[in-house]
Image (cartoon, rainbow, N blue to C red):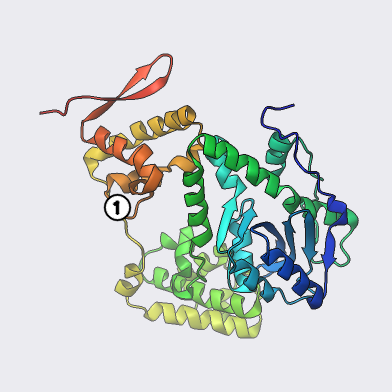
Amino acid sequence: MSPHRDEAAREPAVETARWIDDDVALGEVLDAVRSADIYTVDTEFHRERTYYPRLALVQIAWGDAVVLIDPLAVDVSGLAKLFDGPGLAVMHASGQDLEVLAQACDTVPSTMFDTQIAAGFLGMSSPSLTSLVDRYLGLRLPKGDRLTDWLARPLGAPQRSYAAADVAHLLDLHRLLVQELTARGRLEWAEAECEVARSRPRPMVDPDSAWLRIKEARHLRGMARGVARELAAWRERLARSLDQPVRFVLSDLALVNVAQRMPQRSDELDGIRGLDRRQLKEPAMRGLLAAVAAGRELAQGDVDAAVPTTRALPRHLRPAIALISAWVTQLARDEDLDPALLATRADIEALLREDADGRLTKGWRNQLLGEPIRQLVEGRAALAFDRGHGLVLETREAPR
């Protein structure tokens, strides 16, 4: 047995997970969960054919109980009372789940522990739940079909078992990860990073800045850039009103090509690459041409002012980026940390630019990385290669 595996790990009977499809039963479940200090939560959803993610299932476990909540049959807004309470929500790879829960319940758990984030502080790089359960508990999760239609009813026994398994083992994982993080003195680091993920703003896309998400549109110049801005704003608003993905209204390729051609009449839409006139109904076609006209009238300065700018890195510091990146990779190995969790190239550049809100200026990252990097670029430290240890940061006398 792996030294990480817990011989006392519970084996919840995920096949007996309770299906909740009426509001009375949901109320009883929420009353029970609210009395627990810790619970687990996960979601299943679809967003391939809608603008907003469509919640298809909510899985919750606490104690020895597992429930599957059917959001197609009950009002899940009541989950807000649970999430606003003091209980700790244990999740895995919580990013999209938090977005979906915020959309469905207008809130997210007040405190959260993400097992994937926590594992990064133990040297694992974005591990799957399956790999963590196998490593720490010695269990194999049911295999799932990535093409499962979670909105179908009734869900089959394999689907229910797979969904229940996503939460059934998280309490044991949390306990074991906390033990190991505490032993390494990294529990506070992990908890702080989980809070960053939990509280990260999830604003709606601003239609007027939607064009900035299209790489090819940002490269446009002159009047075409203004047309791209107005087209993207029109597309975003229409997709939102229809609850359709923006690509269903107009693809990025078509948007950029329309912006370059700037058609003023419907017949000028013919032959534009990526634009299917057969799918562009009359109201949408009028809206598109109106957006083109509005874009042509925009003042160039107003459009350019919307493009975010970043202070250029001083030329003399640019060679330091590759050097520091190599040391960060070495440090991640030495400290048994996920390199992506430790620092990105953008984090390094932000520190060298002395951005006050950079990640390396705060908390554990400042202690582990920020101050040593400052010493390096100020000449108070140097990097040396040690055959047995790789890159080593050594202090030295400051240059005169």
> Image quadrant for the C terminus?
top left
Taking the spot 33% from the left edge, 48% from the top edge, the residue there is 361
Q: What residue type is disc 1 on?
A: Asp
Q: Mark 1 points at which residue?
A: 355
Observer-nearest of 56 and 85? 85
Give the left or right position of residue 99, taking residue 392 as reference. right
Observer-nearest of 9 and 247? 9
Q: Position of residue 178 (x, y in %)?
A: 58, 42
In this picture, is 149 found above or below 25? above
Q: Where is residue 295 in the image (x, y as percent from the top left)?
A: 42, 77
Q: How crowded is mark 1: few (under 14 residues within 10 Å), some or many (20 or more)?
A: some
Q: Where is residue 168 in the image (x, y as percent from the top left)?
A: 75, 51
In this picture, is 158 found above or below 72? above
Give the left or right position of residue 46, taking residue 338 as reference. right
Observer-nearest of 90 and 204? 90
Give the left or right position of residue 307, taking residue 115 as reference. left
Q: Position of residue 173 (x, y in %)?
A: 67, 44
Furthest residue toward left: 400
Count numbered badges in the picture.
1
Residue 340 visible here: yes
Residue 51 visible here: no
Furthest residue toward top: 387
Q: Is mark 1 on a helix, strand or loop?
A: loop
Taking the spot 32% from the left edge, 69% from the top edge, the residue there is 305
> Image quadrant for the N terminus?
top right
Furthest residue toward front: 35
In this picture, is 339 found above or below 66? above
